[in-house]
Image: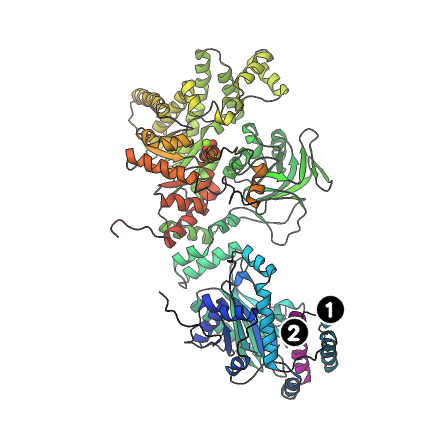
């Protein structure tokens, strides 16, 4: 435990001074590190959070005592020092202490021009930030002179009805007070809270002797860093500007020169090779000893180099990955540190194309960003149009009220998807995540007319088929026109980082993958198997849909069997392909789940076409469609209920799986398939399905003369299955929690309609988060815990996992890990995020070993 030392109202920063980041802020602590490295840092005093808080409340520390901490009374800069630099803070104020007397003295030593520049700069910032006068009145002239100084002093006196303060102690007190008050203001508080700062986050201040940066001998200021903040690649970057202070070299439009020798223009290396070499050495020392890529702020004063400050290089997410990996490769930090330095969610930006920072944005609609990335294309309003567009090689964005299983081919053909309805687990969202397609659902701000094929924005603009739009899932926005993009990067840094993460994590990560393409993606992202293969998606291919419909319309069991016999070889091939791609890794195949109604046409034209292809009167088709329609299809005849009442479908699937197992095991690594029964709510359902699946396995073993193993398990996605998990587990090799349906049923909240009011609910604080996005650990989580505990009670060692969409986010992984689950399964594109998130958990919250 840290020793509780009394915090002084201010402390001169020396190598041994008691400076603490949690009391004096990050900048003060970093300056102390620079001092300890023996870098030429001007004398600095740190004021802790408590002092600054007292100042805001009107209790000033002893100014003369602060000034006495400096060897002589020079000019000062005052800068903010919060616990986290990202929380912002008031801007720096330079040249505090500048008075008429000092102006005269500096004119003598450095010349009138330098003295005028220093004084004017201070009057301007004091007038604007301390006296709160109008900035327009204090514009800095291009060529400061004594007339400009006199004018500024006069305007100050006229506006405040007081002369400009001439006592450095008074100036310093007023600067400290204005900065302390600015930090405590409501706007500043809300801004930093939005960046994750606690409501009571404190501000420290650092008062530093100025290295002037203006004068007759070489003087100026600049910044240097060793990496490019956009790419993270090694490159000396920065600028130097003669006769300047602070960050002028990067903020002024003209005059700054390069640091290293450069064919484009003059450089500091040419101008002053010795100082440049020293600067480079200092910066290198900072990198290796502060274990970070730092941007060094420096000043050259009368040919002498001073290091004023060092801040973490601001970086894009992709640069952050490269920087962390390079620092670890160079031995500056450990691999574990590199892993912990990357926020798991930040990886999403690397996996998908994104809109380039600073690109022009004309927002026409907003919705829920349901699947990451960004894409541009021409609007299409139907799956057919999307496929036609893809056939012409023209990128398109599929815009639908909502998508249904028959839209899958259109989604495959599109570059992005926008739906008017839906939430995080609606059909479009789930499929898009699997395909890695950017998708915005539940949009507001546009009216969609599927009939007239138009999209009308709130300000009356009308978009029709062929108009180009951009979907941005970083923000959930739909933009008019094509926005400038930056590409996905899966480079060596990304691969190394995830390999290091894998070495740490202690929970398995599988992928939800329904097709060969998704399984390949899962392998690319190093998933350890498939945790959920939704087989019904395989039946929407054109050739299969027809046979599927024949099966649905079969009036005798022979006819039904004939249709299933046609589907069998297709399914077998699907599974052989999946097994081959996964090369012996576990593949969990979920038996058929959706209501049959989803395979039937919904409009008259399609019904007529179906009647023709089945050679039946259209009345038969409409009757069957009506028979199968349900008020609440998601709570109706689907999942295992279909498996029990139309058992031939599961028989066919089990046979396809076992025959594929025999085939794939002959061709490659031995396969032990996992078969999962969906929507179970009673143990008898499991017993009945198990009896038939076992019988099919026996038959296939017999016919093929081959032995194979398989594991039969249950998808726990009804509250009753959680509550009765003890009796269900007896017959199951594994329980996999389907948290999409489980959330839907626990809340009694339709996953397809929740998007309509979810943002209101979250904004009003009714729900903390959208429970379809972030696992509700209180309610749904309690059911998971009950299910896991009861399942283990009757079946110790049973495999436990989740395969709902929650599987990919950090909070749910933490929950599953605490509950001792074996793995989580999520869409392939979320696998890298899940790998990194689990490594963070393993590193920051190590599990207690039994012997401990
Ligand atoms: C679930 O319900 O959590 C699940 C994974 O299955 P689906 O989304 O296919 O209903
Ligand atoms: Mg489900």
Mark seen at residue 136: 1
Name the residue nearer the viewer: 556 or 160. Answer: 160
**Cβ of disc 2 within 8 Å of ligand 1?**
no
Residue 184 in the magenta stretch? The answer is no
Looking at the picture, how far across and down is residue 475, in whole percent? 59, 47
Question: For mark 1, does the 10 Å Cα neighbourhood hold few (<14), some (14 to 19), or many (20 or more) residues?
Answer: few
- Asked if residue 434 shows in the view, the reply is yes
The spot of residue 270 in percent (x, y) is: 58, 75
Is 743 positioned to the left or the right of 604 in the image?
Answer: left
Eye-nearest disc, 2 or 1: 2
Structural crowding at the residue carrying mark 2, measured as other residues with C-alpha within 10 Å and reported as few (<14), some (14–19) or many (≥20): many
> How is the structure coloured here?
rainbow
- Residue at disc 1, CB closer than 8 Å to ligand 1: no
Q: Position of residue 185 (x, y in %)?
A: 60, 62
- Total labels: the figure holds 2
Please report the residue visible at 45 percent of the width from the left and 29 percent of the height from the top. 535
Q: Position of residue 482 (x, y in %)?
A: 66, 45
Residue shown at 66%/87% (left/top)? 104
Q: Which residues are magenta?
A: 111-133
| Res 126 label | 2
Looking at the rendered structure, the secondary structure element under dot 2 is: helix
Magenta span contains residue 125:
yes
Which of 701 and 508 lies nearest the eye of the viewer?
Answer: 508
| Drawn side of residue 104 relative to residue 327, left or right | right
Instruction: Give the Cα distance between marks 2 and 1.
Output: 14 Å
Q: Quadrant of the N terminus?
A: bottom left
């Amino acid at each position: 435990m840290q020793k509780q030392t009394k915090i002084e109202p201010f402390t001169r920063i020396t190598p041994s001074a008691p400076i603490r980041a949690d009391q004096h802020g990050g900048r003060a602590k970093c300056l102390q590190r620079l001092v300890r490295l023996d870098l030429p840092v001007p004398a600095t005093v740190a004021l802790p959070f408590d002092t600054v808080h007292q100042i805001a409340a009107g209790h000033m520390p002893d100014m003369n005592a602060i000034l006495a901490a400096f060897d002589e009374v020079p000019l000062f800069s005052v800068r903010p020092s919060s616990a986290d630099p990202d929380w912002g803070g008031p801007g720096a104020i330079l040249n505090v202490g500048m008075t008429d007397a000092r102006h005269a003295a500096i004119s003598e030593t450095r010349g009138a021009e330098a003295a005028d520049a220093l004084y004017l700069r201070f009057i301007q910032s004091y007038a604007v930030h301390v006296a709160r006068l109008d900035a327009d009145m204090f514009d800095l002239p291009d060529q400061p002179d004594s007339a400009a100084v006199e004018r500024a002093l006069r305007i100050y006196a006229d506006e405040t009805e007081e002369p400009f303060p001439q006592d450095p102690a008074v100036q310093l007190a007023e600067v400290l007070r204005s900065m302390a008050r600015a930090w405590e203001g409501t706007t500043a508080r809300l801004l930093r809270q939005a960046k994750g700062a606690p409501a009571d986050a404190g501000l420290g201040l650092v008062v530093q002797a100025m290295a002037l940066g203006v004068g007759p001998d070489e003087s100026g200021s600049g910044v240097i860093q060793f990496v490019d903040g956009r790419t993270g690649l090694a490159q000396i970057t920065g600028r130097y500007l003669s006769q300047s202070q602070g960050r002028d070299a990067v903020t002024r439009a003209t005059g700054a020169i390069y640091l290293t020798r450069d064919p484009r223009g003059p450089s500091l290396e040419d101008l002053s090779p010795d100082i440049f070499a020293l600067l480079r050495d200092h910066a290198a020392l900072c990198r290796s000893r502060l274990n970070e890529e730092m941007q060094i702020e420096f000043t050259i004063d009368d040919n002498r180099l001073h290091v004023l400050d060092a801040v973490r290089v601001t970086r894009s997410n992709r640069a952050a990955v490269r920087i962390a990996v390079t620092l670890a490769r160079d031995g500056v930090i450990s691999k574990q540190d590199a892993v912990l330095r990357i926020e798991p969610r930040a990886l999403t930006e690397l996996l998908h194309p994104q809109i380039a920072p600073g690109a022009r944005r004309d927002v026409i609609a907003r919705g829920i960003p349901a699947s990451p990335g960004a894409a541009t294309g021409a609007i299409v309003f139907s799956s057919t149009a999307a496929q036609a567009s893809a056939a012409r090689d023209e990128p398109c964005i599929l815009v639908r009220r909502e998508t249904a299983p028959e839209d899958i081919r259109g989604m495959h053909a599109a570059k992005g998807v926008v739906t008017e309805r839906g939430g995080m687990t609606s059909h479009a969202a789930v499929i898009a995540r699997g395909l890695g397609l950017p998708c915005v659902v539940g949009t507001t701000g546009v009216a969609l007319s599927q009939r007239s094929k138009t999209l009308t924005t709130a300000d009356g603009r009308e978009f029709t088929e062929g108009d180009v739009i951009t979907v941005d899932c970083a923000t959930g926005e739909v933009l008019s026109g094509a926005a400038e993009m930056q590409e996905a990067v899966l480079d060596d840094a990304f691969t190394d980082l995830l390999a290091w993460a894998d070495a740490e994590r202690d929970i398995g990560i599988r992928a939800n993958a329904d097709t060969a393409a998704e399984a390949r993606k899962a392998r690319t992202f190093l998933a350890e198997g498939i945790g959920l293969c939704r087989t019904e998606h395989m039946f929407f291919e054109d050739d299969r849909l027809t046979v599927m419909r024949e099966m649905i319309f079969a009036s005798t069991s022979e006819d039904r069997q004939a249709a299933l016999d046609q589907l069998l070889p297709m399914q077998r091939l699907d599974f052989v392909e999946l097994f081959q791609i996964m090369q012996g890794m576990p593949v969990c195949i979920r038996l058929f789940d959706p209501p049959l109604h989803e395979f039937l046409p919904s409009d008259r034209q399609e019904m007529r076409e179906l009647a023709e292809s089945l050679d039946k009167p259209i009345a038969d088709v409409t009757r069957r469609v009506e028979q199968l329609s349900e008020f609440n299809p998601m709570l109706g005849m689907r999942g295992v209920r279909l498996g029990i009442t139309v058992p031939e479908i599961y028989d066919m699937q089990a046979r396809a799986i076992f025959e594929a197992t025999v085939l794939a095991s002959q061709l490659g690594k031995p396969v032990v398939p996992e078969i999962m029964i969906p929507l179970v709510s009673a143990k008898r359902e499991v017993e009945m399905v198990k009896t038939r699946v076992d019988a099919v396995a026996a038959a296939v073993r017999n016919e093929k003369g081959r032995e194979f193993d398989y594991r039969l398990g249950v998808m726990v996605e009804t509250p009753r299955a959680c509550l009765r998990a003890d009796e269900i587990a007896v017959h199951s090799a594994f329980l996999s929690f389907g948290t999409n349906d489980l959330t839907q049923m626990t809340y009694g909240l339709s996953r397809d309609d929740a998007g309509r009011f979810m943002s209101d609910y979250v904004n009003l604080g009714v729900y903390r988060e959208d429970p379809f996005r972030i696992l509700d650990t209180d309610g749904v989580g309690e059911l998971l815990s009950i299910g896991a505990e009861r399942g283990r009670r009757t079946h110790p060692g049973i495999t436990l996992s989740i395969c709902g969409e929650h599987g990919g986010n950090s909070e749910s992984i933490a929950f599953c890990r605490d509950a001792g689950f074996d793995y989580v399964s999520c869409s392939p594109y979320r696998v890298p995020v899940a790998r990194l998130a689990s490594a963070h958990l393993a590193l920051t919250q190590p599990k207690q070993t039994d012997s401990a």
